[in-house]
Amino acid sequence: MSARPVPPTPPAGPRSARPTVSVTLDGEEVLAFPGETVLALARRLGVPIPTLCQLDGVSVYGGCRLCVVEVEGEHRLPLACATEVSADMDVRSTSSQLRDHRRRIVALLFAEGSHVCAACVASGACELQDLATETGVDHVPYELAFPSHEVDASHPLFVLDRDRCVLCTRCVRVCDEIEGAHVWDIAQRGNDARLVAGMDQPWGEVASCTSCGKCVAACPTGALYHQGTASGERRPDPELIAFLADARGGVWEQRDNGAASQPRDAAGSHEQGTTP
Amino acid sequence: MTTSSSRRPRVATAWLAGCSGCHMSFLDLDEALFDLAERADVVFGPLADAKVFPTDVDLTLVEGAVTNTDNLELAQAIRANTQVVVSFGDCAVTGNITALRNALGDPSELLQRVYVEHPDLAGVVPTEVVPDLLPKALPLHEVIGVDVYLPGCPPSAARIKTALFALLDAIEAGEDIATVAAAREPGDLRFGN
């Protein structure tokens, strides 16, 4: 990773300057900022909670469900990324139930995709591969789907390999909220859900794509990568997104008109493959 | 089947549908192979001179997916005669490269494409000597019961050594294998390389 300023801790967000909310996290009484999410609190205190779709710098999606936690008195398992702290909340970040749920989620992601780590550009730098190690998934106890998905290599700089896509929507959010181009969307539902460019066109034909490469930097797996990347060569840069969001003082919708009409993407030079 | 403490543990390896890379990694145990030879007999596999899978085996490392009728037969013989079966490497654990064909559908169409439509080959699908392909290449645990999973493409020699000797210790001590497997360090596992 190239050297760049570390985002402020705690990251910018709607909250007062002082932590005033008393919360119990894994049996320990701690102070949280009003409006802080359980995930932000846990990270600030160095308590590991696995995540996949969550990405600093863009909006919360809550799709992968890996960051589920237990809250005393609540039957359902709330998402750490999408749940704000409240006074006297009693949160458990890990338990045998949570570990079991997380293992199942990771195993199901492997079962529904075609994640052949040995032949993947992302092997060695893949968040899904790391999650399998972290959650102890040593095999997939479900029937593997072995799906057949389209690879889109029509873009001059980048490739979309849907076999590796986990539908986390990081690319969708980054393109919409940071780049303002909204090239990506998820089409269809359930097993048919797939990442599409433009109006379900070949990526290379989508005129709104600026080739900025932020989606490629943000992708947690080997679904988006630079043309010519060989097995195990991909090096993503998801921290770039928080850096850009911070440098620009907020996501696209929060900017005033003056800021939004500035010459576009002064930070684009941080990325590989940026077109002139 | 229980191990008699009066004899040395009997270890086998098997090579189903894989590239033999896991066995290459096994050979990378180097001097630890002497430790293995000191405390166990290697009774079957590419590294032992035996044609038929023997009976009363304590530990078998199975490399490769189950992709044809020969693989299926050997896998069943292994399960019937082995106390602890290890799914050894990504092809056995997930199907891996061997299972890439599954997304392409019916194997007879693949054989047609490769042997008949290919301009440099004889124009016939071979049927003699070679075993029939199964409809899908399958991970080992979809075919037989598996006791321990050792992912990796290939698993590193260090990982194989750790698993192998921990399992031999457990077998000799008569410990429950599931408990021993669950007690390992999560960081020791990794799909791919």
Image: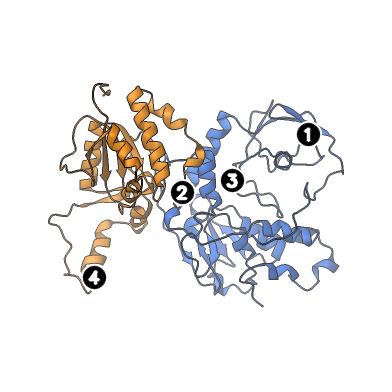
Chain colours: A blue, B orange
Which tag, 1 or 2, sits closer to the chain's start? 1
Q: Amino acid at mark 1?
A: Ser
Q: Which residue is mark 2?
A: A112
Q: Which residue is mark 4?
A: B117
Residue at (60% x, 60% y) in the render: A185
Chain under callout 4? B
The answer to which quarter of the image holds residue B150 is top left
Q: Which residue is mark 3?
A: A64
Q: Is there one chain holding both mark 4 and mark 1?
A: no
Q: Secondary structure at mark 2?
A: helix
Q: Residues within 10 Å of mark 1 (few under 14, many from 20)?
A: some
Q: Is there one chain holding both mark 2 and mark 4?
A: no
The Cα atoms of the two marked residues, 1 and 2, are separated by 36 Å
Q: Amino acid at mark 3?
A: Cys
Q: Secondary structure at mark 4?
A: loop
Question: Percent position (x, y) of residue B19?
Answer: 31, 54
On the picture, is A180 further left or further right than B104? right
Residue at (37% x, 28% y) in the render: B169
